Image (cartoon, rainbow, N blue to C red):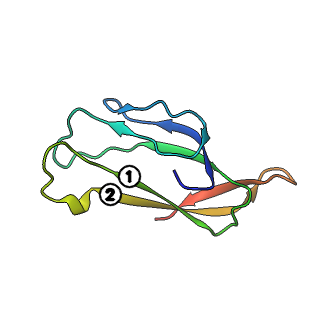
Amino acid sequence: MPELTTLKSFAARAGWHCGDPQPGPTGPVECGKLSVEIRESATLHLAVTVDAAVAPGTVLETNANVSSASPDAKPGNSIITAATTVMADVGRPGSRAKRVANDP
Protein backbone atom coordinates (compact mmCIF):
# COMPACT_ATOMS: atom_id res chain seq x y z
CA MET A 1 0.00 0.00 0.00
CA PRO A 2 1.18 3.53 -0.57
CA GLU A 3 2.92 5.35 2.26
CA LEU A 4 0.82 7.91 4.14
CA THR A 5 -2.28 5.74 3.79
CA THR A 6 -4.27 3.43 6.04
CA LEU A 7 -6.09 0.35 4.76
CA LYS A 8 -9.84 0.89 4.65
CA SER A 9 -10.96 -2.27 2.83
CA PHE A 10 -9.69 -5.04 0.56
CA ALA A 11 -11.47 -7.53 -1.69
CA ALA A 12 -10.14 -10.27 -3.97
CA ARG A 13 -11.85 -12.38 -6.62
CA ALA A 14 -12.97 -15.93 -5.94
CA GLY A 15 -10.13 -18.43 -6.21
CA TRP A 16 -7.53 -16.09 -4.73
CA HIS A 17 -6.11 -16.81 -1.29
CA CYS A 18 -5.10 -13.66 0.55
CA GLY A 19 -3.79 -12.90 3.96
CA ASP A 20 -6.43 -11.35 6.16
CA PRO A 21 -5.57 -7.67 5.78
CA GLN A 22 -7.36 -5.75 8.47
CA PRO A 23 -8.06 -2.02 8.38
CA GLY A 24 -5.10 -0.18 9.83
CA PRO A 25 -1.51 0.86 9.09
CA THR A 26 0.12 0.46 5.72
CA GLY A 27 2.04 -2.62 4.70
CA PRO A 28 2.01 -5.29 2.02
CA VAL A 29 -1.13 -7.21 1.11
CA GLU A 30 -0.20 -10.66 -0.18
CA CYS A 31 -2.41 -12.94 -2.28
CA GLY A 32 -1.88 -16.15 -4.19
CA LYS A 33 -3.65 -18.56 -6.47
CA LEU A 34 -2.89 -22.24 -7.04
CA SER A 35 -2.75 -21.81 -10.82
CA VAL A 36 -3.10 -18.96 -13.27
CA GLU A 37 -3.98 -19.45 -16.91
CA ILE A 38 -2.03 -17.80 -19.73
CA ARG A 39 -3.32 -14.25 -20.26
CA GLU A 40 -5.53 -14.51 -17.18
CA SER A 41 -6.12 -11.23 -15.40
CA ALA A 42 -7.49 -10.42 -11.98
CA THR A 43 -8.69 -7.31 -10.24
CA LEU A 44 -8.10 -6.89 -6.53
CA HIS A 45 -9.84 -3.92 -4.89
CA LEU A 46 -7.88 -1.94 -2.31
CA ALA A 47 -9.33 1.14 -0.60
CA VAL A 48 -7.22 3.37 1.62
CA THR A 49 -7.65 6.48 3.72
CA VAL A 50 -5.10 9.16 2.86
CA ASP A 51 -3.27 10.90 5.71
CA ALA A 52 -4.54 14.45 6.26
CA ALA A 53 -0.99 15.81 5.82
CA VAL A 54 -0.90 14.72 2.16
CA ALA A 55 -1.37 17.75 -0.11
CA PRO A 56 -3.93 17.74 -2.94
CA GLY A 57 -2.21 16.94 -6.23
CA THR A 58 0.14 14.43 -4.62
CA VAL A 59 0.41 11.24 -6.68
CA LEU A 60 0.35 8.03 -4.65
CA GLU A 61 1.68 4.86 -6.27
CA THR A 62 1.39 1.20 -5.39
CA ASN A 63 2.81 -1.87 -7.09
CA ALA A 64 1.44 -5.30 -7.82
CA ASN A 65 4.01 -8.07 -8.33
CA VAL A 66 3.45 -11.58 -9.59
CA SER A 67 5.78 -14.52 -9.21
CA SER A 68 5.76 -18.25 -9.78
CA ALA A 69 7.68 -21.32 -8.74
CA SER A 70 7.85 -22.13 -12.48
CA PRO A 71 10.38 -20.37 -14.73
CA ASP A 72 9.07 -17.11 -16.18
CA ALA A 73 9.82 -16.63 -19.89
CA LYS A 74 9.10 -12.89 -19.60
CA PRO A 75 10.15 -11.75 -16.12
CA GLY A 76 9.95 -8.07 -17.18
CA ASN A 77 6.16 -8.14 -17.29
CA SER A 78 5.64 -9.27 -13.70
CA ILE A 79 5.02 -5.89 -12.06
CA ILE A 80 2.52 -3.10 -12.59
CA THR A 81 2.23 0.28 -10.93
CA ALA A 82 -1.07 2.02 -10.24
CA ALA A 83 -1.09 5.78 -9.65
CA THR A 84 -3.79 7.79 -7.89
CA THR A 85 -3.94 11.56 -7.46
CA VAL A 86 -5.03 13.03 -4.13
CA MET A 87 -7.86 15.50 -4.60
CA ALA A 88 -9.07 18.36 -2.37
CA ASP A 89 -10.42 17.93 1.16
CA VAL A 90 -14.00 16.67 1.25
CA GLY A 91 -16.70 16.46 3.83
CA ARG A 92 -18.07 18.94 6.25
CA PRO A 93 -16.24 22.18 7.14
CA GLY A 94 -13.14 21.40 9.14
CA SER A 95 -12.90 17.86 7.77
CA ARG A 96 -9.39 16.64 6.92
CA ALA A 97 -10.64 13.76 4.75
CA LYS A 98 -9.19 13.45 1.25
CA ARG A 99 -10.60 11.89 -1.87
CA VAL A 100 -8.61 10.39 -4.69
CA ALA A 101 -9.11 9.91 -8.40
CA ASN A 102 -7.53 7.09 -10.39
CA ASP A 103 -5.32 8.36 -13.17
CA PRO A 104 -6.24 7.00 -16.59
Depth check, front residue: 8 or 92: 8
Q: CA distance from mark 2 to mark 1?
A: 6 Å
Among the two numbered marks 2 and 1 on one chain, the one whose residue lies closer to the N terminus: 1
Which quarter of the figure has residue 90? bottom right
Depth check, front residue: 64 or 13: 64
Mark 1: which secondary structure?
strand
Depth check, front residue: 95 or 52: 52
Q: Amino acid at mark 2?
A: Ile
Asked whether, in this view, residue 5 is left or right of residue 33, the answer is right
> From what the image shows, is residue 89 above or below residue 1?
below
Which quarter of the figure has residue 4? bottom right
Across and down, in percent, residue 8 comes to 60, 40
Mark 2: which secondary structure?
strand
Q: Amino acid at mark 1?
A: Ala
Residue at image coords 21%, 44%: 68
Residue furthest bottom as drawn: 57
Asked whether, in this view, residue 104 is left or right of residue 91, the answer is left
Circles 2, 1 touching at the beta carbon (< 8 Å): yes
Residue at image coords 78%, 54%: 96
Instruction: Name the disc covering residue 64, or none.
Output: 1
Instruction: Please give the count of numbered marks on the rendered protein.
Output: 2
Residue at image coords 87%, 54%: 93
Across and down, in percent, residue 97 comes to 74, 52
Circle 2 sits on which residue? 79
Asked whether, in this view, residue 1 is left or right of residue 39, the answer is right
How many other residues sit within 10 Å of disc 1, few (<14), some (14-19) or many (≥20)?
some
Across and down, in percent, residue 102 comes to 52, 59
Instruction: Name the disc covering residue 15, or none.
Output: none
How many other residues sit within 10 Å of disc 2, few (<14), some (14-19) or many (≥20)?
few
> From what the image shows, is residue 19 above or below residue 78?
above
